Image (spheres, rainbow, N blue to C red):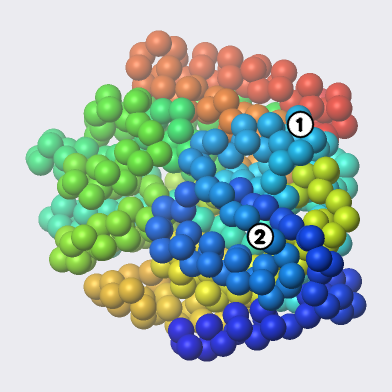
Amino acid sequence: MKVLSGLLIFLILLAPATLNGEAQGRFPDGTAISLLQWHHFVPRYDEWFDDWALAWGEANNVAVTVDHVNLAEMPSSLATGIGANAGYSIYEMPTPAAAFVDGLRDLGELNQRAREMVGVQLPYCRASAYLPANDKWYGFVATQVVNHGNYDIDLWTEAGFTDGPQSWNDLLETGALIYQNTGIPVGIGLSPEPDSEMAVRSVIWSFGGSVQDDDENVVLNSEATIAAVEYLAELHQRAMTDEVFGWGPPSNNQALIAGEASFILNPSSAYRSLQNVDQAAAAGIGLSGALAGPAGAFVGANVLTHVIPAYVDGAEWEAAQQFLLDYLANFDEIVWQSELYNLPCYPGSVTELDTWLANDPFGSQPADKFRFLETVSEWSAQLGYPAAANPAISQVYAENILPKMVAKVALGELSAEESVLRTHEQIEAIFAEWRARGLVAGAR
C-alpha cells in the first residue's frame, strides 16, 4: 500500500494544475504560497507534509513555505495576518474559524470542486466550513480528529468492564470505585483548554443539552444542561483530583501514559505516543467510541479548517486553491502519515481506511484496536451542534466559557442552576453581538 500511495503522489505532482475543470499547466514564474500549520501531535506527519508541500511546489512552479507554531497560537496568528492585510496564504485552524469570516476568501467554488472530485462531505464537517447566515464557505475542511475514549484495560477489566465504560454512568460509578481501590482517577479536564472544552460539550450533548438549537438560538439554560453540569461536578468529587482544573492540552495524554488515569477522552495521539516507546504498555490501553448518556452518545470532533485570507489574490490565490485540492487528493497518505489520527471528512477520499481500521498498520495489539472508528460519523459532533459552528460558537469556545461554567460548580462556588443561568446570559450577549452583524441566525 505504501508503494501505491507513493505512486499516487508522484502522478498528482506530475499532472498539470487544474481549477474549474480547466488545465492551467505550471503556475507563472514568481508564484509563491505560504502555509502556517500547528505542530502535529504525530511528529512523522509534519516531516512528511513539509516534504510533500515542497515537492508540490517544484512540480507546479510555485515557491512553497511551511511554518509551524503551537496549536494555541493559530487564532492570534490568523488575526494578525487579517489585521495587517498581509501574511500567510493558507492557515490550518484547529477549530472552525467562523469568527474571522469577514477577513476570509469565499471558498464555495473550491468546496464544490472537492465534492465533484471525491464525493459527499460529512454534515458536521460542512457545518464547520459553511456559514448559513451569510451563505459563505469560509473554510475548506478535509480532516476530522475525534476525541474518543482511552482506558486502562486491566483496571476496567478487574472492575467488570472488559471493553471499558460504555456510558457516562459507568464512568462515574465504576471510575469512582477504581479510584477508591487503586488511587488512579478518571482524567477528564475541567480547565480552559481544548480537551476540556470537548469533554464538557460531549457530556452536555449526551444529556440532551446544547449551547444553541437548530435555528441558532441560545438554549443552554435547560434541565438537561443543569443535569450534565451536576454530573461533571459529581464525577470530579468522586472520581477525579483537583489537578484537572489546571490541565493543559498535553496533561491527559501524560496522565494516561504515566498510568495515572483510568480513562481519558483524547484522539489517538496519546495511545500512539505510548506505543512508540513501550508496545507492551500500549497493548494495555483500550480505545472506544462515545459514552452514552440519557439523550444518546456523542463525542466532540475537532474539525480542522483550512482558510485563505481575503488579501490573497492573483496567482497566489489560484495556487493556494489548487494546493488544497491536491492535499485532499492525497488523503490516503495523510491518514497513513498521521498514523490514523487525521480522519477524512470526505469518506470517498480514502480508499484503504476500512482495511487499516481492521488491521492497524502500526502494530496495535489487538490488530483491530481502531475498528470502533468505522462508525465514527454516527457519534461525532462539531462545536456548534446541532447547528453551524458560527462566530458566536467560536467565541464561546475561544473564551473557554463552558469549562469555566462547570468548574465553578465542581469547586462549590455556584450551584449548577446559577452557573448555567449566568453562563446562558453571557452567551446570549455574545450571540446578540454577532447576530447584529448578520453572522448568526436565530429569532430571539
Position of residue 177 measured from the top left corner of the image (x, y, whole percent):
17, 40
Q: Residue at x 69, y 32 (%)?
A: 79
Q: Residue furthest top?
A: 413
State whether residue 318 is above or below residue 206.
Answer: below
Relative to 372, is 171 on the left or the right? left
Tell me the kind of residue under disc 1.
Ala
Drawn side of residue 53 relative to residue 33, left or right? left
Vertical comparison of 328 with 179: above or below: below
Mark 2: amino acid: Val
137, 430: nearer the viewer: 137
Give the residue at mark 1.
84
Q: How many marks?
A: 2
Q: Is residue 146 above or below residue 228?
A: below
Q: Secondary structure at mark 2?
A: strand
Residue depicted at 64% across the width and 52% down the height: 35
CB atoms of marks 1 and 2 within 8 Å? no
Left or right of 102 on screen, residue 176: left
Report the residue marked by disc 2.
64
Where is residue 333? Give x, y as percent. Answer: 53, 74
Q: Quadrant of residue 407?
A: top left
Q: Residues within 10 Å of mark 2 (few under 14, many from 20)?
A: many
Q: Which mark is residue 52?
A: none
Q: Earlier in the sequence, mark 1 or mark 2?
A: 2
Of residue 310 and residue 185, the one placed in the foreground of this image is 310
Q: Which quadrant: the C terminus?
A: top right
Q: Residues within 10 Å of mark 1 (few under 14, many from 20)?
A: few
Q: Residue at x 53, y 67 (%)?
A: 51
State which mark lies toward you, 1 or 2: 2
